Amino acid sequence: MQFMLLFSRQGKLRLQKWYVPLSDKEKKKITRELVQTVLARKPKMCSFLEWRDLKIVYKRYASLYFCCAIEDQDNELITLEIIHRYVELLDKYFGSVCELDIIFNFEKAYFILDEFLLGGEAQETSKKNVLKAIEQADLLSPEIQVKLIKGKHDDICPLNVNFVA
Amino acid sequence: MKELMVRAIYCEMLGYGVSFSYIHAIKLAQQGNVLEKRVGYLAVSLFLNEGHELLLLLVNTVLKDLQSTNLIEVCMALTVVSQMFPKDMIPAILPLVEEKLNHPKEIIRRKAVLALYKFYLIAPNQVQHIHNKFRKALCDKDPGVMSASLHIYLQLIQENPEGYKDLAPSFVTILKQVVGGKLPMDFNYHSVPAPWLQIHLLRILSLLGKNDQSTSEIMYEILDESLRRAEMNHNITYAILYECVKCIYTIHPKSDLLEKAAKCMGNFVLSPKINLKYLGLKALTYVVQQDPKLALQHQMTIIECLDHPDLIIKRETLELLFRITNDQNVTVIVEKMLDFLRISEDDHTTIDLVGKVAELAEKYAPDNEWFIDTMNTVFSLGGDLLQPDIPNSFLKLLSEGFDSVEEDKKLRLFAVNSYISLLQGDSSKLPQRFLQVICWVLGEYSHLREDLEPGVVVRLLAKLLDMKSSSSETKCWVLMAMTKLCPGGAALALVHDVSETYSSSLDTMLRQRAQELQILSQDSELQAKVLPRSASMEPVEVDSSLSFLDGFVSEALAAGAAPYKPPHQRQEELSRSKALNLEPYGLSLPISISSCSITDRQSPTLLSISSGLSGDSTDFSHKGSSTALKLDGVKRLWGRDGYLAQKEQTEEAPRIEAASPVRSADQLGDNNASNSQTPNPTPSPECDQEKQQLASSLFVGLASQSSVCLMGKSDPTSQRFRRKTKASGSAEQITDPLVSPSDGSDNLLYKSLLDSPDLDVSPPEQTAGLVAPNGSCDAEEEPADADVKEIETPPVRDERVTAEASPHDDPDGSKDPSLASHLPAELSALSHSKVTLLFSKQNLDVSACHVQKEDSVVLVVFISNCSDSFLQQIRLQVDSEELEVSCVSDCPSEELKSHSVAVCQYFLTVKRPSVHFDLSATVSWQPPAGLPLTTQFSYRLPLATFVRALKLSTEEYGAMWLAFSHDTKQNLTLIHDGWDPLAATLDVLKRKLQLHVVEIIGVEAIVACCLQQDQPCLMHCRMHAGMLAVWLRSPVPDLPDCLLYCCQRALQEL
């Protein structure tokens, strides 16, 4: 995998993870182009895109788009499932995750991503193991578990994990 | 701090520059507590790139954390390492990471494996020694570690499938266990056991089983089982199925598996889910390369997909169609592709697709009109995004033509007609590239249309010049075309106007073209010479070394101009002059040993300066000719008759195999059976007819191909526009020695031609050319002694031998015959120099001569006892600064009987070139009565003794010339006695110095020789203003100077 982007329906970037070294300028350009292209697509359209010489695999969960770039020979469907598994992990960790969770605790989302994907490859596919690793690290923290800000905003609906394409 | 860092990350994501906080991220990772460290590491991994310089500051922190006892810290360190790490710092932490492979915690082992995977990707040679540890990781009891190790294996096997065949059974076993549900439940994903693992394994297996029947056979069973098990209707099972199908079609085929895979693919393609449909098409695209008939089964689906609203699906379908194109369905498919191009907005897709259309058109075009029309559409749609090789190869095709002249003419005529009508319409919308093509074609071929006045064409072209949108490059093309057209005398006034306007243009290129046009349009005689109509196909000779400028250059040099220095040398000198000069009052010009060593002789200052410079540039081994412009590597685009690049292009468009005939027979039977009863789902009745028609036109060639396959003939579809092997023809002409410029630096051209696969001439190996001195001397056909006799002739050498060392010259003549008879048998056959008496003292005479063998020089010393008594303890020691002296046979005995002669032989090899080689020798002996005596003497050999002819071809000469870095230039006097001064002079040099004259071209000649086989020296001579301008080059620093001196002497002594 080359990179992963999370952005909202308004085109705001929520999370970015680059597995290939690129300059900041390049990153911004790619992000801008991709957000535009993906947002322009209709819901019933194919989740895969050819973009430059890469394949883009994207999926929408509630108001968030998850978008991965893979090489041509990679399996698109399994990438789609990687996205899904990541959402499952977030869901399990935050308990019915929504966009605000990711906005306010985005470093946690990064930690989970790092446990799940390492250097662009799926590292640990067992849900239990990933969460165990995260919890262990969290336990060392002197702070009490992060308070989730969910519920304060009614307009934010949880990402529907059980939604299957 | 931690909070601040989190905010900095957020700001960075929003697109603000937070580079000031990078250093704090590193500090946080270094100093904070565990939680702060975690954020610090995260920030570092998000902020910094692999190559960022601040990353070096992290190395120490990582080292410390890897050694920590806290698991979390180790985990964090490993995580950051496997995301980014400076390449050159890998050795520092490699042992620590390696150690972690044996860690009791599986999470550490897993991360360590992934870190090593990362290291392998960025620096494969640094982890070579731990390959067996990867095997251990593969057998790890934790599935997580094992699956992590598969990343490495996938990479390794991709690079070298042969090396890991032995692992195939293990991979099969693992896959069996996974499929059989032997893994812990939490690896399941939607009740499919470890799908990521499965997909990885399938990919590895397909790599291993490719073109390997025995390995493939191990896999059949498990592949079958995977296909069977994956029946649940979920994305993840489709992902596995897709990988299975790909694997089955990659490995050695097995009929029933193929059948199942084909059925499975059918499910994909027919699926209402768009993602699956896409994947099905992708799989089909992959598969039809091996079995085009499979597309037949799904023809109706494919046609539906062609009209799919989602462009991605359409695009993929076109990709599929591209693979099954043949000469019967090409028109339909190309039309579909062009339709798509018209609506596509993505540049990347456009470029890709335009290339494909051009390829298909060139390969399968049914007739001229279609071909030209299609290419016109390609040019106008592709616009200026188009890869430049498309117009190039199109023009090449037009200019070189095909097998029949009549056809060529028709094609060109059609092109001209269509372009005329295009230009008569609105030409302002046409892309620049297209206009350039049009200009070229009209310039070259508009005369083919007899009813067309050149004036009309010129007027049309002039219209292009006035257009605002035309780029100056296009204008150049227009002017070129006009230049070609004006001999008809048409529209002279217009032409005049145009050239007037543009000859004052600011664009130099444009100005030059305008000047050309102006001059050529006024002088029809010159025009006919420069642009001969009939000879437009002749390749143009290119004198890339600009040797015609040599005269100018030497004149300028003689007038005191500074010699040309290549930019890099100038740069270096500049940087050197900026450095502190520690030598007080030193010469500002760097003077090397070479010029110092030759200061004893009279040489014009110019020479020593230039040699000093050349000596300076020893490290630039490829230093180009110092006076000529460097044209190496510059592609020549323009020639006398237009655009040239296409003639040098030897690249053939890759041909796509439309059909692969290798299929087992029963498989073919199956497919044929299914062909005849292809289930065509026929839904809507009204558009059905149309679709059927389309289907029959799209898939027309495939069925017939299969029948051909059955008969066992694999007849590749005939290519209409098969290129003649014109490229090789012109290549030969270019390499013709007559054409090649005298100093032979045309080898670059030659090198580029070497790439051409169908070159008829067997190219002399480049490498051989460079080391030729060794080989070519051995291969000389002349017998060796014949050579040496020739050396005998110059009288110079004998005179010079030990001028000062021999006190009495006269008597040695008498001794000569007697001593010569003492020459060893193996040397006596060879010619030797005159035996010279070196000294005579107390009844001991020492004489010496040298023998020139084919590959070496042997010094023979005769020690003769003229007394009546014994001489004892005779020792002889020979030394030289410039020569390496190795003893072949020493004095046979320590004592010498009365009136006997002892013979010693020494092999001489040149350590460093010099004008003369002085040998100093010491001989000691003890007369019967008295004290031991010691005497020193010296012996001198000229350089010419060591010089041998170097037989080269002109091409080899050219290759070597460019490779040599040391050079020197000088004017020599010519010998004016004969009718041909050049030949006479060269003849003298050849006789006296054994130079080999490679070739004489007009007033120039190239000459080669070598010093002792492995030290070549090349000479380029040119008659100029009553002098012979010579230019010597060699890889050996002082050789050119020394040899030049020898030449000077040889010519003066006449």
Image (cartoon, coloured by chain):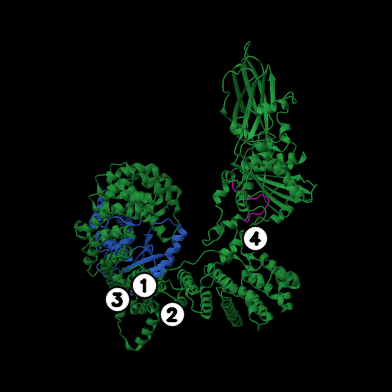
The residue identified by callout 3 is B270
Discs 3 and 4 share one subunit: yes
Compute the Cα span from label 2 to label 4. 44 Å
- Earlier in the chain: of badge 2 and badge 3, it is 3
Could you say which is closer to the camera, residue B873 or residue B403?
A: B873
Q: Which residue is found at the position 29% from the left and 80% from the top? A: B677
Res. A142 visible in picture: no
The residue identified by callout 4 is B542
Mark 1 secondary-structure assignment: helix
The residue identified by callout 1 is B709
Q: Which is in the foreground here, disc 1 or disc 4?
A: 1
The residue identified by callout 2 is B332
Q: Position of residue B468 (x, y in %)?
A: 62, 75
Mark 4 secondary-structure assignment: loop
Magenta segment, principal secondary structure?
loop
Magenta-drawn stretch contains B715: no
Compute the Cα span from label 1 to label 3. 28 Å
Q: Position of residue B318 (x, y in %)?
A: 41, 74
Could you say which is closer to the camera, residue B486 or residue B460?
A: B486
Q: Which chain is green?
A: B
Dot 2: few (<14), some (14–19), or many (≥20) neighbours within 10 Å?
some
Discs 1 and 2 share one subunit: yes
Could you say which is closer to the camera, residue B961 or residue B187?
A: B961
Location of residue B700 (image quadrant): bottom left
**Which amino acid type is marked by label 3?**
Leu
Mark 3 secondary-structure assignment: helix
**Which amino acid type is marked by label 4?**
Val
Discs 2 and 3 share one subunit: yes
Q: Colour of chain A?
A: blue
